[in-house]
Image (tube, rainbow, N blue to C red):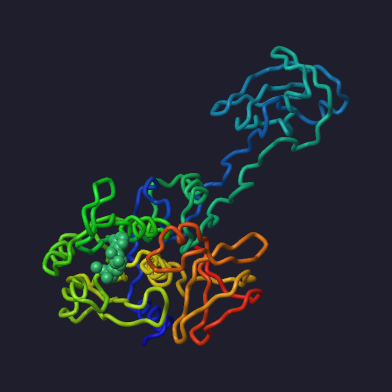
């Protein structure tokens, strides 16, 4: 059997980082920056007030309380400013440009709020409540480097430097296909021998959680020709494909039967539990990577975390490797098959303890839904006593 590490290494050696493209900011959330972003101007672009209040010369209010004539009123967005002279005050709002001659802002709370004359109750230091030009970013300064994942704050600073479009590595488009003659759509009645398709929902959502764009292409029956047709139709919009089911040792294994003869997808046994039957390769003229995951719901989900998630990171231009682990203190004994790496479902608590969930079968999706981590048991270990230190992967 192939090791988990060797299987992931093969996958990471095959998948390629997506080429950059220029996107409107509205579409850039969750993508990876592919250029350096710098600001063409200082930010803020001009000295401005940090508070609602009165722009003054600090020296003029040193003897506060004092009354000063209010010679102007400046709102945010004001363009034409009169310089202020000795002994003058100007009413000013947050974000409004500081008029020439002023060197401080007195917050409105320290005044009587007057509009013709204002009584100022307290002195201020020079520079009080003034935001200087370039205090956030200097002109020409780099604000984001290539390889940065674009979240809300990153989008904000890109827009804040005046950009409308940005070069990024896009979110990989991943088509998800479930196979199985027993599958019917949730929301419809179950007939004899049927179950509701859950994998395509799980895997499409997992793609989104991993920074891709998931497209749920629904289910196909166990007919290899129908599977190939559906795959063909979906390839045009896919950077990668995930299938579930149809790769085990039984009869009616459409994925294996359809893709095996192509010679570009390898079906292998990987030394892990759950998720032993795995397939990976490329399909179509564009050599689109395809992950053929086993059908059992927990197996396909665990396989996604171990193999597809790192591959998506590489496609996104991010550092990619095995899932991060941390150690935890096990609160119940565990069994694991010899020769396979186990990924048991557990609940990791804030105090660093981990409890296996009840129901460790690869079909027990309800137990998976209660878990927040996978407890890893190495290949050669078969018994783990309560109280042992174990490695866990957060999910
Ligand atoms: P297979 O890998 O096709 O042999 O399927 C293994 C098990 O997983 C069988 O019990 C299937 O009914 C179940 N299964 C396969 N595909 C799905 C799916 N999309 N949703 C829920 N269960 C599935
Ligand atoms: Mg099947």
Q: Quadrant of ligand 2?
A: bottom left
Residue at image coords 48%, 60%: 148
Q: 45 or 246, which lies in front?
A: 246
Above or below — where is 207 with respect to 187?
Answer: below
Q: Is residue 185 left or right of residue 91?
A: left
Nearest the viewer among 246 and 145 is 246
Q: Residue at x 47, y 77 (%)?
A: 342
Residue 57 seen anywhere in this rendered image of the structure: yes
Residue 308: percent from left, percent from top: 37, 69
Give the position of the N terminus as an image quadrant: bottom left
In percent of width and height, residue 97 lies at 61, 32
Tell which residue pokes out farthest to the front in this image.
Answer: 192
Relative image position of residue 196 (x, y in whole percent): 28, 54
| Residue 99, x across and y down, in percent | 65, 29
Residue at image coords 59%, 24%: 75
The residue at 56%/46% (across/down) is: 42
Confirm whether residue 289 shows in the render: no
């Amino acid at each position: 059997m192939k090791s988990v590490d060797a299987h992931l290494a093969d996958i990471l050696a095959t998948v390629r980082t997506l080429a950059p493209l220029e996107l409107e900011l509205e579409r850039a959330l969750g993508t990876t920056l592919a250029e350096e972003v710098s600001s063409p101007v200082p930010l803020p672009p001009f000295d401005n007030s940090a508070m609602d209040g009165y722009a003054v010369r600090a020296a003029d209010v040193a003897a506060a309380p004092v009354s000063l004539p209010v010679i102007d009123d400046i709102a945010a967005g004001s363009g034409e400013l009169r310089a202020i002279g000795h002994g003058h005050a100007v009413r000013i709002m947050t974000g409004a440009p500081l008029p020439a001659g002023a060197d401080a802002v007195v917050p409105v709370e320290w005044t009587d709020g007057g509009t013709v004359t204002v009584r100022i109750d307290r002195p201020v230091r020079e520079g009080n409540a003034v935001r200087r030009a370039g205090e956030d970013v200097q002109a020409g300064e780099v604000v984001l480097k290539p390889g940065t994942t674009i979240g809300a704050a990153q989008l904000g600073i890109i827009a804040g430097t005046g950009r409308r479009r940005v070069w990024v590595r896009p979110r990989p488009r991943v088509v998800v296909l479930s196979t199985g003659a027993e599958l019917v759509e949730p929301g419809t009645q179950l007939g004899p021998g049927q179950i509701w398709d859950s994998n395509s929902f799980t895997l499409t959502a997992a793609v989104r959680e991993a920074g891709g764009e998931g497209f749920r292409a629904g289910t196909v029956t166990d007919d290899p020709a129908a599977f190939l047709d559906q795959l063909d139709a979906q390839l045009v919009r896919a950077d990668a494909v995930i299938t579930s089911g149809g790769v085990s040792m039984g009869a009616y294994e459409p994925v294996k039967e359809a893709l095996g003869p192509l010679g570009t997808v390898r079906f292998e046994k990987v030394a892990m539990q759950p998720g032993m039957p795995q397939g990976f390769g490329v399909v179509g003229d564009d050599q689109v990577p395809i992950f053929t995951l086993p059908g059992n719901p927990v197996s396909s989900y665990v396989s996604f975390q171990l193999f597809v998630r790192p591959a998506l990171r590489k496609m996104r231009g991010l550092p990619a490797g095995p899932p991060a682990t941390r150690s935890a203190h096990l609160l119940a004994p565990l069994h694991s098959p010899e020769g396979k790496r186990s990924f048991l479902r557990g609940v990791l608590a804030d105090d660093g303890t981990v409890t296996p969930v009840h129901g460790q079968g690869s079909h027990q999706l309800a137990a998976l839904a209660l878990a927040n981590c996978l407890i890893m048991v190495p290949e050669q270990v078969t018994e783990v006593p309560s109280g042992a230190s174990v490695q866990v992967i957060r999910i």
